[in-house]
Image (cartoon, rainbow, N blue to C red):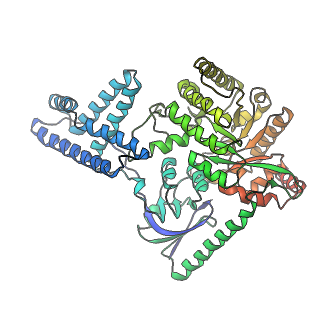
């Protein structure tokens, strides 16, 4: 038996079979001239690759239901791909360029596919823009076949696996949430990375910081993962397996005991009430929130809708996330939650959350976390925000909606957003589309800048939500996804706590409702500190709600205030 120690990320114990996910291979296209006598050989390779890709797509089509609405979108995409691969006009253009320019076949295919896609994008037509992405995607598959690159398909991971990988994308994690995964063991990613946040939401035991773990374990080996002690046990003996099966039974009994808190209000021993909300990333998670007794949705991360959609099929092409698609998603959550409030955050893309969409630019940045992300991206490309706001306001009549803007750093940013809000309202009125006029519009306090001017921001915001993950990251200047410095990430830093205290004071003085939706809201040690600072609204992973109720029931508010004061006075 081998034991590997990492960093605890998501609690829980799992026993399963090791499944190693290979590191992705980046496609590199060579460019060089060839001789005339090499033409036929290159063209034969191209036609063979086209045939292989076409066959694979056809087989996948045959496996999809012709009546299922869920499979309909995939069928349409793959049918389009096959038509493009069989297009004689485009194939002749490729051949003419190949024979006239005498560049190697790989470069020729890439050049002509990108050239044709660019023409379609420049046509200024939504439908043709979609087809542009189809072109680059399907001929990307052909290039991968020619270069012997075979991208890993996350959908092939079997149930009962303990997954070992260098890293995972948020989209991969969303796909895995629909499977019975025993655990995640990753080399990269911090305890507040988005992959880990999703793993907690889905109840997947997770350990990070395991150096080269995917190279140290073989597929098929029995693996035990302990998310609390951050241990990975490989090829354990029978007694060890039985010991950890006992731990799993204990965890299950603990969950059963917490069910007694399911329908109880969240309150301290002396009766101080709290509201506990759920953080979600997809409409399906709202069902979990209801089942766990959430008082509402405190944070709907809409960027995960894009990720879930783009990850729905093998190498899915970038798609536009239309107003109607968004409307249906928001409407379903609002209807599901009934009278309970649902706070939906506008798109928080960019930085460490990369989204495959034709609506979003593919920008290379030296420091993306400090770059064009979240509300900055929305204001730079206002049509993205406008589309989302139209969908949100249309859905507002189906429930208790609140809209929230991320990564605010100035009053002017809020005013710019509100100008677009007002423009959207005027459009909907002109189109006689019903919406809730007085839908609250608030902001996230997740930068030191926002905390420092929270008194000013309170004049233009209906509510505040403290995003403690980014607040900590930006205040301390630490990339929480970077394994070399993630150990320095500390939400209990006096600098962070003072910024939180400052925001709480501004909100109270200006009668602005305040909640915390970062990871601090669901961790037992930090819940006590936040409660003692006067915060009464917490939004967390749905599965942490009952345990948070149980925690609060063990303390008086005076005891929590004493715990908080100790941290704030810790020099």
**Residue 4 at x, y = what percent?**
54, 68
**Residue 63 at x, y = what percent?**
33, 52
Q: Residue furthest left?
A: 37
Q: Is residue 241 left or right of residue 78?
A: right
Picture residue at 67% right of the left edge, 40% below the top: 342
**Residue 303 at x, y = what percent?**
55, 40
Q: Is residue 372 left or right of residue 443?
A: left
Tell me if residue 162 comes above or below residue 348 in the rendering. Answer: below
Picture residue at 43% right of the left edge, 35% below the top: 319
Picture residue at 88% right of the left edge, 54% below the top: 271
Q: Residue furthest top?
A: 430
Q: Is residue 228 left or right of residue 516?
A: left
Q: Is residue 153 visible?
A: yes
Q: What is the total number of numbered labels drawn onto the structure image?
A: 0
Q: Quadrant of residue 120?
A: top left
Tell me if residue 200 comes above or below residue 219 in the rendering. Answer: above
Q: Is residue 78 left or right of residue 102?
A: right
- The residue lying toward the viewer, choosing from 471 and 537, is 537
**Residue 249 at x, y = what percent?**
62, 73
Q: Residue furthest front?
A: 67
Tell me if residue 370 comes above or below residue 223 in the rendering. Answer: above
Tell me if residue 94 comes above or below residue 190 in the rendering. Answer: above
- The residue lying toward the viewer, choosing from 355 and 462, is 462
Q: Is residue 405 visible?
A: no
- The residue lying toward the viewer, choosing from 97 and 17, is 17
């Amino acid at each position: 038996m081998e034991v590997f120690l990492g960093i605890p990320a998501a609690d829980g114990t799992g026993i399963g079979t090791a499944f190693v996910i290979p590191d992705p291979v980046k496609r590199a296209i060579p460019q060089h001239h060839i001789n005339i006598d090499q033409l036929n050989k290159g063209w034969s390779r191209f036609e063979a690759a086209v045939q292989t890709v076409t066959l694979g797509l056809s087989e996948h089509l045959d496996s999809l239901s012709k009546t299922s609405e869920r499979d309909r979108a995939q069928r349409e995409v793959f049918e389009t791909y096959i038509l493009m691969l069989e297009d004689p006009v485009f194939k002749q253009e490729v051949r003419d360029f190949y024979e006239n320019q005498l560049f190697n076949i790989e470069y020729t295919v890439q050049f002509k596919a990108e050239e044709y896609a660019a023409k379609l994008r420049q046509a200024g037509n939504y439908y043709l823009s979609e087809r542009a992405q189809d072109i680059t995607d399907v001929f990307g598959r052909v290039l991968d076949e020619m270069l012997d690159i075979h991208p890993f398909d996350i959908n092939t991971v079997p149930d009962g696996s303990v997954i070992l990988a260098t890293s995972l994308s948020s989209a991969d994690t969303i796909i895995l949430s629909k499977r019975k995964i025993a655990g995640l063991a990753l080399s990269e990613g911090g305890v507040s990375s988005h992959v880990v946040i999703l793993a907690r939401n889905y109840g997947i035991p997770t350990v990070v910081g395991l150096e080269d773990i995917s190279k140290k374990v073989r597929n098929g080996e029995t693996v035990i993962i302990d998310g609390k002690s951050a241990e990975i046990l490989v090829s354990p003996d029978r007694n060890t397996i039985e010991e950890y099966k006992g731990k799993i039974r204990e965890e299950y009994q603990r969950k059963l005991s917490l069910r007694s808190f399911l329908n109880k209000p969240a309150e301290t021993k002396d009766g101080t009430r709290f509201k506990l909300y759920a953080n979600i990333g997809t409409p399906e998670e709202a069902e979990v929130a209801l089942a766990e007794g959430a008082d509402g949705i405190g944070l709907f991360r809409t960027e995960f809708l894009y990720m879930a959609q783009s990850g729905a099929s093998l190498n899915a092409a970038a798609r536009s996330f239309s107003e109607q698609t968004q409307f249906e998603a928001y409407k379903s959550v609002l209807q599901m939650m009934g009278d309970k409030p649902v706070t939906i955050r506008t798109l928080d893309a960019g930085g460490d959350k990369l989204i495959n969409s034709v609506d979003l630019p593919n920008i290379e940045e030296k420091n993306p976390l400090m770059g064009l992300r979240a509300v900055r991206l929305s204001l730079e490309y206002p049509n993205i925000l406008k589309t989302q706001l139209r969908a949100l306001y249309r859905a507002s009549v189906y429930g208790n909606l609140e809209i929230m803007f991320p990564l605010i750093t100035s009053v002017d940013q809020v005013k710019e957003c509100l100008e677009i809000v007002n423009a959207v309202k005027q459009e909907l009125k002109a189109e006689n589309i019903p919406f809730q006029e007085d839908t609250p519009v608030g902001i996230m306090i997740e930068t030191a800048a926002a905390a420092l001017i929270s008194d000013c921001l309170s004049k233009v915001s209906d509510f505040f939500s403290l995003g403690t993950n980014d607040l900590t990251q930006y205040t301390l200047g630490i990339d929480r996804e970077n394994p070399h410095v993630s150990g320095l990430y500390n939400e209990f830093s006096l600098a962070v706590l003072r910024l939180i205290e400052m925001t709480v004071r501004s909100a109270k003085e200006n009668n602005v409702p305040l909640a915390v939706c970062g990871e601090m809201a669901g961790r037992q040690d930090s819940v006590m500190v936040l409660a003692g600072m006067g915060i009464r609204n917490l939004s967390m992973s749905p599965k942490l709600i009952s345990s948070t109720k149980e925690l609060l029931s063990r303390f008086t508010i005076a005891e929590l205030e004493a715990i908080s004061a100790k941290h704030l006075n810790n020099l």
